[in-house]
Image (spheres, grey):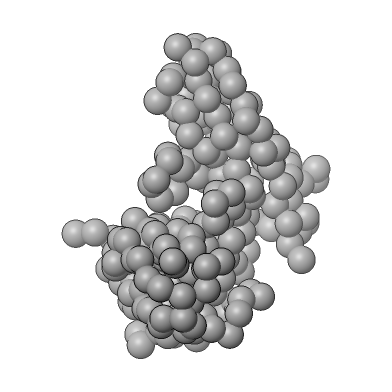
Amino acid sequence: DTAVSQTPKYLVTQMGNDKSIKCEQNLGHDTMYWYKQDSKKFLKIMFSYNNKELIINETVPNRFSPKSPDKAHLNLHINSLELGDSAVYFCASSRTPGQTLNTEAFFGQGTRLTVV
Amino acid sequence: QKEVEQNSGPLSVPEGAIASLNCTYSDRGSQSFFWYRQYSGKSPELIMSIYSNGDKEDGRFTAQLNKASQYVSLLIRDSQPSDSATYLCVVNDNDMRFGAGTRLTVKP
């Protein structure tokens, strides 16, 4: 019944490893997002997809690669993890901005990534 | 670069008082505005949305929007300790941009 679910909830890994975070939404939304929340608690948008198409790609290292196999899924793959990648990563979904005003975003529970 | 600015706080009010949270945004064409609340260790949750100028009330919460001044605010009346959280201003046009958040503490 969870609207936006992401896995895993916690991820501890060593520097240099490659890891993936998965996200799925069952709300029928066309737009999905990845956010990074750092230790200062600022939520910064990383990527936005609409119907599997990349819409927003903020200044994010190339080591981060989103993949959207269908509009209900948006996964995040991170290569060569660095200490500075440690943060909480949130997935979210919403109706398509620009098509409606009601573009409330629904968030997953977050993935706390710790790179050691 | 679209910007969403909030007073970072922290803001501390006594129980029962009115808490006032403010936000300004840079894109004059913005149409959708939201206030989210985030408890420590939890994901953000929507508490108010507003799309037109004026006030919108929902229980103890009132959102105010002034597009001419590019200003949106949130008032929390009769503040309760359970309102202690970080409040995030969000402007959504073709993206969902968050302000830095204002940490509110309501003291019993």
Q: Residue furthest left?
A: A1
Quadrant of residue B66 in the image? top right
Check the image and report above or below for B89 versus B64: below
On screen, residue B67 versus residue A5, left or right, reads right
Q: Can the viewer see residue A101 in this picture? A: no
Quadrant housing the N terminus of chain A: bottom left
Q: Can the viewer see residue B14 in this picture? A: yes
Q: Residue drawn at (47%, 28%), measured in percent from left and top?
A: B84
Question: Residue B43 at x, y = what percent?
Answer: 40, 50
Q: Residue drawn at (76%, 66%), measured in percent from left and top?
A: B1
Check the image and report above or below for B43 versus B103: below
Q: Residue drawn at (55%, 56%), measured in percent from left and top?
A: A38
Question: Residue A29 at x, y = what percent?
Answer: 38, 70
Along the line of sight, which residue is nearer the eye, A35 or A104?
A: A35
Check the image and report above or below for B32 versus B15: below
Quadrant of residue A4 in the image? bottom left
On screen, residue A29 versus residue A64, left or right, reads left
Along the line of sight, which residue is nearer the eye, A28 or A72?
A: A72
Quadrant housing the C terminus of chain A: bottom left
How many numbered discs, if any? 0
Q: Residue furthest right?
A: B69
Q: Residue drawn at (47%, 41%), measured in percent from left and top?
A: B37
Question: Residue B46 at x, y = what percent?
Answer: 45, 46
Question: Residue A79 at x, y = what percent?
Answer: 47, 84
Along the line of sight, which residue is nearer the eye, A93 or A46?
A: A46
